[in-house]
Amino acid sequence: MLLVTGATGFVGSAVVAHLHEQGYAVRAMVRDPSRADVLPDGVERVAADLADADSLARAMDGCEGVFHLAAAVGMPGPEARELNVGGTRRVVEAVRRAGVRRLVHTSTSAAICVPDPDGPGCLVAEDAAGGTALTDTYSATKAEAETVVLDAVAAGGLDAVVATVVNVYGPSPRGPLSYNQLFAAAARGEVEGIVDTRVGWTLAQDVAAGELLAFTDGEVGRRYVLCGQIASFPEVLDTYCELAGSPHRVRALPQGSELPPGAPPFADRSVVYGHLGGYRVRDDGARALGAAPRGIAEGLALTADFMRA
């Protein structure tokens, strides 16, 4: 049995669907039952809360693995820290109490984005020492959460790996959330300009496949970066518009630019990464495991078809 936290989220629901399709017995941790309609038939539901260590341990009872994806995005600082850092600490404690064999902790490129020693911009690498150049609440608390997991591994007694995801998009049981919202806004002509900075992009299904590889074949205490392709925000949005049959295109703004108030969801990430000069990725470990995430041409074509349907 495999437990997934954050099972009804954009990425979490994709992980649940993939594990289920691969024949695993899956238990989805659900805090809001009204969101459980995205879960496949045959997936067990269990009520638990990251704030309640006892409920977490009960949810993990009999599980061989735990995929921890629950996280706070867009919450105020104290709430985000309580969920992302405190919640992860309680997950680690519950994994130990329940005797779970392996924890796959889902992190983000924003948690390990540091100045690139070999050139301009930043580097996202599997062998990063930890910490991030980003100062927003989400990035900072996810960096702290990753430290909680890796420190527990180093202290002994915890088998855990870290799956680090870059900007996620594409078909997901949760629907047109995440960067899909930005793509749709661009296709409607609602994105006048976006900062011209290069970052990583990965399909939600490819994240799910990479997380399973990390669980089955990953090395204890290792970080595995799941990245399909590095591309600029304007390149991605214009490609999506073309594939979606939209006549609209976006204006590329210089790195360091700001966006006007009211910009569509996730457009602000181009500003955040633009101030850092974008980033490059080292993901050799994930690819050695067999991860083969698709590039943006194929991924955006799948996304356009999904969004059209």
Image (spheres, grey):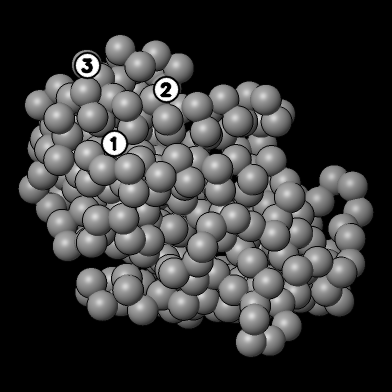
> Disc 2 marks which residue?
50
Find residue 209 and report its horizontal and vertical position in percent. Answer: 27, 60
- What's the distance in space between the residues labelled 2 and 3, CA to CA? 12 Å
Establish if 71 lies above or below 265.
above
Q: Is residue 145 visible?
A: yes
**Dot 2: what SS?**
loop
Please give the residue where the numbered disc 3 appears in the rendered image: 58
Q: Could you tell me residue 77's position as x and y percent?
A: 70, 31
Question: Looking at the rendering, which quadrant does residue 187 occupy?
Answer: bottom right
* Camera-side residue of 52 and 235: 52
Kind of residue indicated by mark 1: Val
Q: CA distance from mark 1 to mark 2?
A: 12 Å
Locate residue 97, reporting x and y percent: 21, 23
Residue 3 is left or right of residue 72, and the answer is left
Decide which of 63, 21 is in the foreground and name it. Answer: 63
The residues bearing labels 3 and 1 have C-alpha atoms spaced at a distance of 13 Å
Label pair 1/2, CB-CB below 8 angstroms: no
In the displayed structure, 127 sits above or below 140; it is below
Residue 62, quarter of picture: top left
Q: Circle 1 is placed at which residue position?
A: 4
Residue 251 appears in view: no
Amino acid type assigned to the residue bearing label 2 in the image: Leu
Q: Is residue 120 left or right of residue 259?
A: left
Q: Residue 309 location in percent, x, y?
A: 43, 54
The residue lying furthest to the bottom in this view is 118
In the rendered image, which quarter is residue 152 located in? top left
Task: Give the foreground label among 3 and 1.
Answer: 3
Secondary structure type for disc 3? helix
